[in-house]
Amino acid sequence: MSTHPGDRTATDRAEGIRASRSQRADLLKPHELAALGGLEFVARQVVEGFIAGLHRSPHRGFSVEFAEHRMYQPGDDLRYIDWRMFGRSDRYYIKQFEEETNLRSYMLLDVSASMAWTSAPGVLPEKIWYAKQLAASLSLMLVRQGDAVGMMSFDSEMRTHVAPRGGRRHWHELLRTLIPIEAGGQTDPGSALRDLAGRLRRKGLVILISDLLVDPEETRLALRFLRHRGHEVLVFHLLDPGERELPGVGEVRFFDPETDEELPASAADVRREYREAVEHALEEWRRELAPQGIDYVLVGTDEPMAQALRAYLHKREKLG
Amino acid sequence: MGLLNPLLLMLAGAAAVPLLLHLFQRHQGPRVVFPALRYLRRAEKESARRIRIRQLLLMLLRILAMLLIAFAAARPFVRLGGVGHAPTAVVLIIDNSLSSSAVMGDRRVIDDIKERALDMLGDAAPDDRFWLLRAGNAGEPALAGDAASTMTLVRETEPAATASDIGAAIEHARALLAAGAEGRAAEIQVLTDLQVNSFRAPLASGSNAPPVIVWHPSDAPPQNRSITDVQLGGGMAPVENQRTVASAAVSGTGTTPINVRLTVDGRLAAAASARPGESAVLALPPRGAGIVEGTVDIDADAMHADDRRFFVARVLPPPTVQITSDAPFIADALAVLAEAGRIRMSSGNADVLISPAATGPIAQGRGAVVVLPPTSPNELAAVNGRLAAAGIPWRYGAPVPGEARFAPGANDPLLTALESARMRVTYTLTAEGAVTDSALLRLSDGTPWAVHGERRVGGTYVLLGSPLSVEASTLPTSAAMIPLLDRLISAWAPSLPPRTEIAPGSEISLPAGTTAVQRPDETKDDVAGAAAYHFGTLPGIYRILRDDSLIAAYAMNAPASESDLTRLKERDLDELLPGWSLHVTDDAGSWRRAAFRERLGRELWRPLLLALLLVLLVETSIAAAGRPRRGTAGARVPDTEAG
């Protein structure tokens, strides 16, 4: 039986908090994040850590309304230096702006049985944990920017649905929906995406968080349909390290919990071909989605959240 | 090319194991939850051909490994192309003991042995050196020479009437090779019938000893019957003009009676029949004093040499007997023996004196004395003093309470007759100092009743435990009385009878004045002035002559142990020759191939084991390519269920 990363001892939790104080939470490893606490706390820590680091980011600020000044730090974009302040005080100040937007975002969360898997129980989080954490963090960032955020979880059909709205209170409602979600059932993102397309009246940003162990053609067709309807699409492909590199077991019967299929094989015999098959599949996702203007981000469940958040930020910048 | 252990090639059957595993083994590993099965399916499709080839290769390597093991175990060898063989020093041991004269089919065992030897010698090279050890020729040194001279010796070899000691011959061979191989490869070759008695004792460990190659006949040994012993007069010397009997022990297999004939001085004297394990009793007619020679023989069988047994006996005049006490029952019994001509009564200077311990002259004369015990315990002290003065190391002790009886005896009519006798008075007999066991008769509790030995003053003595009176025992009135006195006077009291049988190859001191020894084949050896004579191994009668007068004769017979043709098992040799490098075969071809091992080139087991090692290394590396590596990413089993 696997151990959920949330089931941590007090010692683990204390270590996690100490780590978060000495380091930005968005840069912590998932198992360190899990030791910090529940979904809300971790999401806040991640987002705050991420925002605190933005001044060192090469990305431009995205807000349009001036908010305040702060001291220039190496790495800041020179275009935002307030030269007038420099003339008065002989010090460099950076102008910071407050966002003003009405983007409608929609997060699609894959909760099929394959998302409940981890290659290293107790060490690495299950994909579903990572997906929920990522969804909570992203939604917090969206809410902070004044965007409306909605969410839908699905396996072979829609499981939960939260209509897009803005505000902190709504974010808490999102969390209340996210927390009890557990993975199970088969995946059919095509129908979920088509369902979503029918519900979205206005153009917005659709964020798909999934391990993409799905019918690729059907899923890409659904994503193209969303694009065709004018939505921006961002795909987070969650990949456990044990899926990228076949577990080093001998003669075993591999069992797919979604399809109940079994495949006897020697891991060592097929390791190289497996690695190639995975790379080929990943390359196919990139190759097929990019021409459609769909952003595809591969996220390892052993990687810090910052990478995924940066990808989102990049996408958000493009949206203006 | 040949094989030293061809039977071990059967191990090659194990090569079927990898093949069967390859054909029938199915994946039955544990179940592992793994959602990314779609990638795995694609990977397996792509690698299926490579996996099949790898598994086929592994199977072939494993079969090859099994075949190499079996082939190496069979100890193959190859003759180096065109080259004879490395110079070899060979000790050839030929077992020409009596048992080698047994006929199997239409050939003697010795003829097969010689043929094997000549085959081997025919393969010899000029640089080889040979020693021939004929195990049956007692005392013969090892005969050194080249192949040609050894072949001549082999052809001349005939069975000897002796028992061989193959173990001693092998030890001798080892010493010879250690000293004289001179850098040649050393080898001991043994040609023997593996007769059950051919090894006296296990040898010391043969580590570092030359290899021993043994050939023995493959056929089962033939049935054999023999005369293993001839006794005249039940151990008593034949008496002049008295009938006596010859008892011939018949041994062998089966239950059919065998005809047994007694021949004396070249004339058939008696015939009887007996089954193996029994004794034939043959009447010997009365004869005058002197030496009597004869044979006991049975019908010829597979081994003729033990079908006849020679004997020599000295017929003596009846011994003179004197009794020095008033013992009516003894006197009556002696009178009967005298009337029958078994003894002569004498009033002085007798051969045998029967005398009471308390009063008789037990310390006088140089003849034999039969000492009667004291009639009363009061006399014990005086009697023991007289015994000590006569130089007799035994002492009488207190009487044994109650009645005593004799220990039962088997195959001796006298002991059988004595079983019913009861002794009311029996004095214990205790030896003073170290005395070898000289008890002639024992009571049922094992204590001696009659003992004998030699007096320090000369002559012999016999001490009895009970007085021969009706008050002291039932002996005087029993049927055993006269046979007991006859045995006492004729067998136990006299000094040991002169030796009349000699072992093959033995040596004796010649009587003074001996001029010649006539051998069984009628040839004479001039021995005038010689003190001793060394006999050969030819069975028969050897006559000791002074000029033309016969002064003594000896019978020489083959050892009875050679009559048992049972063979040792090959595995017995492993125990008899612990740690020796042995190759035992009953096949002529295998013998010829095994001889001159160095000639065979080097044995191939070393290169075969190297090849095996190489195959196993390749197999391991190929198999390892299909096993999980430690520390690789994803080395954990994420979720395993019982398979």
Image (spheres, coloured by chain):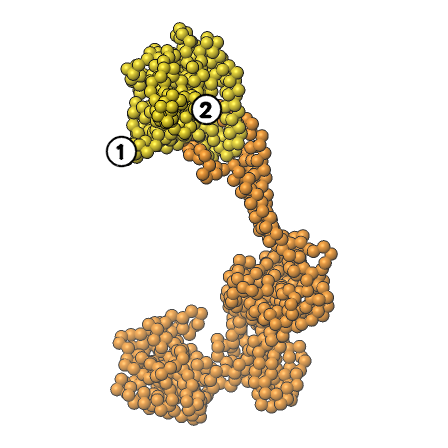
Chain colours: A yellow, B orange
Taking the image as drawn, is residue B101 in sight? Answer: no
- Give me the residue at 53% from left, 42% from top: B620
Tell me which amino acid carries mark 1. Answer: Ala
Which residue corresponds to the image point at 55% horizontal and 85% vertical from the top-left?
Answer: B289
Circle on res. B279: none
- Dividing the picture into quarters, in which one does residue A190 lie? top left
- In this rendering, would B250 be left or right of A153? right
Identify residue type, mark 2: Leu
Choose between A75 and B518: the one closer to the eye: A75
CB atoms of marks 2 and 1 within 8 Å: no
Query: Which residue has dot 1 on it?
Result: A10
Q: Nearer the viewer, residue A257 or B509?
A: A257
> Which comes before the other along the chain, label 2 or label 1?
1
B128 displayed left or right of A299:
right
Are the residues under marks 2 and 1 on the same chain? yes
Q: Residue at x 68, y 68 (%)?
A: B129
Which percent across, then down, holds residue B384? 32, 87
Residue at image location 42% in from the left, 69% down from the top: B410
Which residue lies most toward the front here? Answer: A88
Mark 2 belongs to which subunit?
A: A
Q: Is residue B607 left or right of residue B634?
A: right
Residue B91, given in percent of the width and then of the height, sits at: 63, 67
The crowding category of the residue bearing disc 1, from other C-alpha atoms within 10 Å (few below 14, some 14 to 19, many at least 20), is few
Residue A136 higher or lower than B318, as above or below:
above
How far apart marks 2 and 1 lie (CA) works out to 32 Å
User: Would residue B405 be seen by someone viewing this image from the given angle?
Assistant: yes
Question: For mark 2, what is the residue?
Answer: A298
